[in-house]
Amino acid sequence: MKKLEEFTPNELATLATIIGIIIASKYNINQQNVIGNFLTGVAQNILIIAAQNQNLQTQEENQCGDNGNSNSNGSNKDLQKQIDELKEHIKKFEDNMNC
């Protein structure tokens, strides 16, 4: 079997769709909501970890280079974008939990 990073984007999307359909078909609507929200929470935690790893890696690269002066503005924009995306994911998760 392929490693996760060896799949094309279309293959990953297809795999996710198939897995979602299989899981959903085995549970009632209440159970589907619980499982869906749980998996969303897991995914958000993975995104948080990835964002922080990327942040730390960028900081380390900047310290090794020129103390971060030349690329810090671009890095800050990237980090702000990631923060905004995480906030959006958290809001969606909270909205799903309130249903």
Image (spheres, helix red, strand yellow):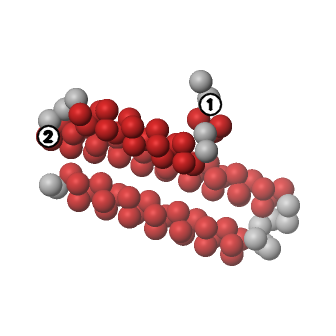
Q: In this image, 84 relative to 50: left or right?
A: left
Asked if the residue at tag 2 contacts the one at tag 1, i.e. Cβ–Cβ closer than 8 Å, the answer is no
Give the farthest residue toward the top: 1
Q: How many marks?
A: 2
Which residue corresponds to the image point at 39% horizontal and 43% vertical from the top-left?
17
Q: Nearer the viewer, residue 89 or 20?
A: 20
Locate residue 5, reporting x and y percent: 63, 39
Decide: is 52 above or below 69.
Answer: above
Locate residue 86, reporting x and y percent: 44, 60
Q: Amino acid at mark 2?
A: Asn
Q: Could you tell me which quadrant the C terminus lies in?
A: bottom left
Which residue corresponds to the image point at 34% horizontal and 39% vertical from the top-left?
20
Earlier residue among tags 1 and 2: 1
Q: Is residue 45 visible?
A: no
Q: In this image, 27 relative to 53: left or right?
A: left
Q: Could you tell me which quadrant the N terminus lies in?
A: top right
Q: Secondary structure at mark 1?
A: loop
Q: In this image, 63 relative to 90: left or right?
A: right
Q: Quadrant of residue 18?
A: top left
Q: Nearer the viewer, residue 98 or 14?
A: 14
Which residue corresponds to the image point at 42% horizontal and 49% vertical from the top-left?
44
Which residue corresponds to the image point at 56% horizontal and 53% vertical from the top-left?
51
Q: Amino acid at mark 1?
A: Lys
Q: CA distance from mark 1 to mark 2?
A: 33 Å
Residue at mark 2? 30
Q: Quadrant of residue 34?
A: top left
Residue at mark 1? 3
Q: In this image, 76 relative to 29: left or right?
A: right
